[in-house]
Amino acid sequence: MNISIPNWLIILGGLGQIFTAMIYPYIRHQVFDWYNDVKQLKPLNQEIAKTYGRYIQGLNFSFGLIAILIPNDLKNHSHLAIAITGLIAAYWVGKVATQIAYYPMYDIPKKRLFKIGSYGMNALFVLFAVVYTLLFIFNII
């Protein structure tokens, strides 16, 4: 079986990941009122929460850049392609699983924009999980 994953799909996924990184602060502040919740933590725990938020944002942005700049390298069957696509696939599959298991939709404010946005973001997360899982499988076959 000869399957091919088009570069446009990888690049689209990369653009979506950069979008998630850029929109992340807005979602934390406007949708979840995250900063006010974090202020209730002890100072060290506040910094830990903020640091992990930055890690998530940085990873999403970095994964997006990799996909946009070197899509062919993500599907060249090399050991590095296997490792990178496996890592990113695990990251997004884990995100989708966590989203389903631990983030019930009723916690999202009832504004129409936020409800539509939540479906859009979840669709992006599923897209990322599928694209990178397919890339990983493609690389190991």
Image (cartoon, rainbow, N blue to C red):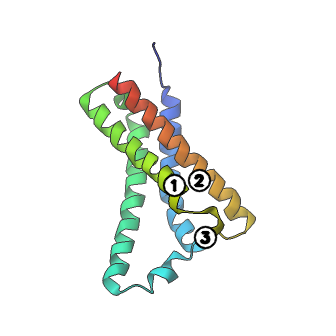
Q: Please state if 60 lies on the left or on the right of 80 as rendered.
A: right
In the structure shown, which secondary structural element does the residue marked by tag 1 occupy?
helix
> Residue type at mark 2?
Met
Q: Indicate the amino acid at tag 1.
A: Thr
Q: How many marks?
A: 3
Mark in the foreground, 3 or 1: 3
Please tell me whether residue 83 is drawn above or below residue 46 in the rendered image: above
Q: Quadrant of the N terminus?
A: top left
- Which numbered disc, 3 or 1, marks the residue that appears first in the sequence? 1
Who comes first in sequence, dot 1 or dot 2? 1
Which label is found at residue 31?
3
Indicate which disc, 2 or 3, sits on the residue closer to the N terminus: 3
Mark 2 and mark 1 in contact (Cβ < 8 Å)? yes
Mark 2 = which residue?
A: 121
| Residue hosting label 1 | 20
Residue type highlighted by circle 3: Val
Q: How crowded is mark 2: few (under 14 residues within 10 Å), some or many (20 or more)?
A: some
Q: Is mark 2 in CB contact (under 8 Å) with mark 3?
A: no
Query: Residue at coordinates 54% horizontally, 41% vertically from top-left?
Result: 127
Residue 53 in view: yes
